[in-house]
Image (cartoon, rainbow, N blue to C red):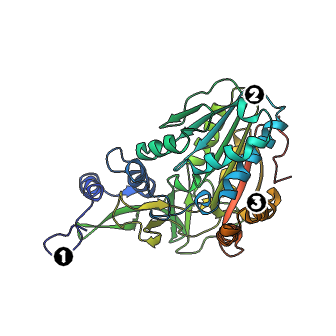
């Protein structure tokens, strides 16, 4: 790690850029800080870091066990059948990482006649390095794949299924702190002119629109809001070629009901670190407020199913049975298979901390695993 002459770690390029911005224009919102850290065109984390995997900053469910992607693939096939087994289907993945989930999904779905033949896959990822990895992973998948750096304005006029694992938690959030009987926007500024830190806007703010009436705030409470929820719901509608049906599956860590708390965190080398740790080289995320996202989808005219804890959702899809068959077919890997599935289902870990939410156009029946 590069250090300054005094022995303190040198600023990352993005940290220096942000500090110059704050000195020039004043403190910035938490959402602006998070957006810059993740998506700055030159130095953003998701523009340059591969991150995912045992050697990266974090490990996602598809990297933990192949059963995860396989079950999602079969889930998509069943939804396609619910839609009437159309001859053409858009299958969109938001934030596909290294392509592992889609690779496993396509392998498992071979058993469903006609499904793969109907597919055109659209992978949406702003990280050019990851897009190259996706091309390698899916090079021989036998299905047309389009690689996109942003969500398209439109898709071919076919039924559409969208899947997104650990995507919602990357949407920038705003934070508000309750103090002196009023809400104040939380900002990112500088202390001693050089160190990034949180501070509170002295001017009171209107109550955040997502604040439930039943929640009574006390001094020091923090409420997080995400303007990206409604934008994403509207994007789903944009992807739908009406009257063709639309279905989506979102899996992420978060909470089912809106509540108070500061959940913004940094992750580096698979450890939790300060959100101000090496900006642009540290992953930032926040727990997903599934109530907020659900309400945004419904306000856009979409129906929702769930959310359900990930462990319960995968259990309903048959993960135990799938793992048992894999272990029987691969006895030398049985221990690793069992450990991976146990991690996905852990009651005090991923099994309860991650939630699954189904989103659909009103003409689609309740989605598999939720009914």
Q: Which residue is mark 3?
A: 314
Query: Residue sitting at 81 percent across and 59 percent down?
Result: 318
Query: Residue sitting at 81 percent across and 54 percent down?
Result: 369
Foreground: disc 1 or disc 3: 3
State which tag comes first along the sequence, 2 or 1: 1
Q: Is residue 193 left or right of residue 305?
A: left
**Residue 63: quadrant of the picture:** bottom right
Q: Quadrant of the N terminus?
A: bottom left
In the image, residue 3 lies at what x, y percent? 20, 70
Query: Residue sitting at 41 percent across and 42 percent down?
Result: 128
Q: From the viewer's perspective, is residue 145 above or below residue 105?
A: above
Q: Residues within 10 Å of mark 1 (few under 14, many from 20)?
A: few
Q: Which mark is residue 7?
A: 1
Q: Which mark is residue 244?
A: 2
Q: From the viewer's perspective, is residue 257 above or below residue 115?
A: below
Q: Residues within 10 Å of mark 3 (few under 14, many from 20)?
A: many
Give the CA distance from mark 2 to mark 3: 27 Å
Q: Which mark is residue 19?
A: none
Give the CA distance from mark 2 to mark 1: 60 Å
| Callout count | 3
Taking the view exactly as shown, the residue that stands out farthest to the top is 157
Give the CA distance from mark 1 to mark 3: 49 Å
* SS at circle 3: helix
Viewer-closest of 321 and 303: 321
Q: Is residue 164 left or right of residue 139?
A: right
State which tag comes first along the sequence, 2 or 3: 2
Visible in this render: residue 362?
no
Viewer-closest of 238 and 78: 78
């Amino acid at each position: 790690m590069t250090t300054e002459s005094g022995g303190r770690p040198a600023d990352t390029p993005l940290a220096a850029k942000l500090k110059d911005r704050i000195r020039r224009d004043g403190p910035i919102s938490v959402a602006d800080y998070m957006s810059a850290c993740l998506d700055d065109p030159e130095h953003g984390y998701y523009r340059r870091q591969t991150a995912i995997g045992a050697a990266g900053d974090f490990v996602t469910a598809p990297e933990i066990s192949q059963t995860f992607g396989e079950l999602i693939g079969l889930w998509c096939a069943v939804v396609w059948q619910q839609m009437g087994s159309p001859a053409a289907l858009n299958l969109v993945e938001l934030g596909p990482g290294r392509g592992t989930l889609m690779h496993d999904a396509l392998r498992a779905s071979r058993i469903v006649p006609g499904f793969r033949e109907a597919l055109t896959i659209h992978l949406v990822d702003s990280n050019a390095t990851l897009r190259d990895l996706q091309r390698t992973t899916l090079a021989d998948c036998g299905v047309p794949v389009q690689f996109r750096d942003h969500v398209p304005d439109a898709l071919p006029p076919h039924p559409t299924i969208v899947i997104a694992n650990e995507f919602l938690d990357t949407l920038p959030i705003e934070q508000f702190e309750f103090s002196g009987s009023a809400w104040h926007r939380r900002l990112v500024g500088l202390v001693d002119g050089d160190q990034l830190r949180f501070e509170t806007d002295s001017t009171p703010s209107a109550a955040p629109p997502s604040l439930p009436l039943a929640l009574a705030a006390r001094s020091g409470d923090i409420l997080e809001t995400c303007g990206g929820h409604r934008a994403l719901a509207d994007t789903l509608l944009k992807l739908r070629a009406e009257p063709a049906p639309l279905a989506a599956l979102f899996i992420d860590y978060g909470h089912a009901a809106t509540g108070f708390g500061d959940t913004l965190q940094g992750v580096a080398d698979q450890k939790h670190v300060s959100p101000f740790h090496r900006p642009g080289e540290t992953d930032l995320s926040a727990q997903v407020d599934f109530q907020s996202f659900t309400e945004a989808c419904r306000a856009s005219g979409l129906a929702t199913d769930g959310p359900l804890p990930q462990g319960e959702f995968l259990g309903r899809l048959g993960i135990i049975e799938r793992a048992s068959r894999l272990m029987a077919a691969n006895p030398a890997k049985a221990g690793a298979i069992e450990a991976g599935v146990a991690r996905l289902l852990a009651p005090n870990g991923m099994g309860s901390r991650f939630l699954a939410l189904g989103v659909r156009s009103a003409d689609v029946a309740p989605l598999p695993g939720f009914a």
